[in-house]
Structure formats: C-alpha cells, structure tokens
Amino acid sequence: MILTVENINVYYGNLLALRDVTLQVGKGEIVSLIGANGAGKSTALKAISGILAPRAGRIVFDGGEIAGLPPHRIARMGIAHVPEGRGVFANLTVVENLEMGAYTRRAGREIRESIEKVFTRFPRLKERSGQLGGPLSGGEQQMLAIGRAMVARPALMLLDEPSMGLSPFLVGEIFQMIEEVNREGVAILLVEQNASMALSVAQRAYVLEAGNIVLQGSTAELQNEPGVRAAYLGG
Ligand code: ATP
C-alpha cells in the first residue's frame, strides 16, 4: 500500500467531521471515495495532505507516518492535492501555473522536461500556454490543475471533485486525463459526487456517510449493491 489511513478522527472545533475513518490506496491504484454533500470527503483529503491534523489515528504514506505534518512537507514526500474549485492562479499564465507545481523540486532542467511532458500529453494546455489562468474554461482550468499536480511528480494524487461544474463531455475528457495520469504510475484517491463516473474509473471504492465509512469494496461489487444503486446511481 502506498497510503494507509487508520481510524482517524478529524474535527472542526467541536464538530466531529470524520469518525474512525480507515482506508487504503495501493501503489498505482485508483480508489474512489463517494458520498453526499457534507459527508466528509474533502475533509478526508485535507487530513491526508496535512491541511487538517487528525486528533486520533494514523496516516502512513510510503512507509512513514505523516499525520499532523505540515502540508509542504507532505507535498515534498510525494502527495499532490488538487483541491475542490481547482485553485488555478488567475493572474498567472498556463505555463506559470504549471511551474508552481514544481515548488517541491529543485532541478530547473527536469522541471522543464516535466512541463514539456504535460504539454505533449495534453496539447490543449500547450495551445494555451501563454494565456492567463483566469479566463480559461472550467474544463481547461481542471486540466491545468491536474497538469500542475503532475509537474510535482507525485506518487499519490488526491483529486477533489474534478467533475464539478463541467458538462458531460468535459467530464469524460477529465476522466480520460485521470486514467492517463494513472497509467504513468501515479496512484489516485478520487473524491466525487458523480458516483457513476467515480466507480467506472476506479478499481475500489469507499462510501462515506456523515463522517463514517459505511461500505467498501471493488467497484464491480459496489455498482451492484442495492443501497449504492438507490442512493448514488439513480436506482
Ligand atoms: P462537499 O462535496 O459539499 O464538499 P464533503 O463530503 O467534501 O462535501 P466536507 O466538506 O468534508 O464534506 O464537510 C464535512 C462536514 O464538515 C460537513 O458537515 C461540513 O459542514 C463540515 N465542515 C467542512 N468544513 C468546515 C469548516 N471549515 N468549519 C466547520 N465545519 C466544516
């Protein structure tokens, strides 16, 4: 396993947002975390990337304990977090946004190569390389946010609601991009409200309800689970 989250409790003040949450991501695996609005999905990603510190439990990444470490150290260890709402820098160009992904790295020439690789894989970003991030469409911004995370050369990418606000066509494109990133050997923990897409792209999934993991299994099992079908797949 590249990531093991064990019995974490995460609070906002006195509000318990995650209770005893346990989940794992294998090397090179895509794992989805699905659940309704407010179930705690974003909170789980924030705990893993160090934005929130769990009050109990363990988070082990690549063999080392990371729970409670600051986000910049966790990023440097190889976890890239693509936040909900993308976090594109509106006043920087596409290429400058990609360069920001390299803040965890030193060698200038290798960073150039990583950016070129993103451009080769995703030519739409190359066409827009000199344009500002702000006026890009939602789909392009999502692509840029994922491209920026790739430049960090992570072992694990955390993706928060990449389909949010996108047309079905663009959702399809973004999910193809996620599969391509995964083919490069990057493990992915994907948070989604679009459960049918999330289950179609992943090998395994967890269902989060009100801060608790209530179901888990292979995506094939979960797609046939009556409770999952009724609550998340439209019957
Ligand atoms: P969404 O898809 O709406 O982001 P989610 O499953 O990601 O949903 P979280 O954002 O993780 O849910 O929120 C989990 C719970 O924690 C919710 O009850 C939410 O109201 C609460 N919460 C989230 N952020 C904060 C905060 N900064 N302060 C207090 N409570 C918060």
Image: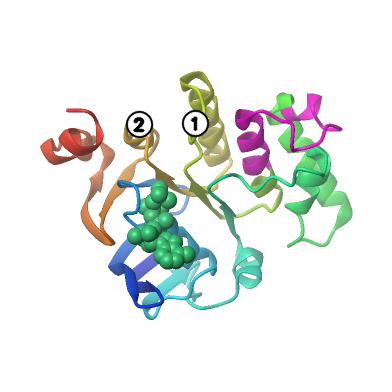
Query: Are the residues at dot 1 and dot 2 in contact (C-beta closer than 8 Å)?
Result: yes
Report if residue 223 is visible in the image: yes
Q: Nearer the viewer, residue 59 or 232?
A: 232
Task: Tell me which residue sits at (54%, 23%) in the image.
Answer: 170
Quadrant assignment, res 70: bottom right
Q: Of helix, strand and loop, which one carries label 2?
A: helix
Q: Amino acid at mark 1?
A: Phe
* Residue farthest toward the bottom in the current orientation of the protein: 55
Horizontal and vertical percent position of residue 44:
41, 61
Horizontal and vertical percent position of residue 235:
17, 28
User: Which stretch appears magenta?
Assistant: 125-147
Rendered position, 159 above or below 54: above
**Residue 90 horizontal side relative to residue 158, left or right:** right
Q: Of helix, strand and loop, which one carries label 1?
A: helix
Report if residue 7 is visible in the image: no
Task: Tell me which residue sits at (54%, 68%) in the image.
Answer: 51
Q: Which residue is mark 2?
A: 200
Q: Is mark 2 within 8 Å of ligand 1?
A: no
10 Å crowding of disc 2: few (<14), some (14-19), many (20+):
some
Quadrant assignment, res 24: bottom left
Horizontal and vertical percent position of residue 90:
75, 43
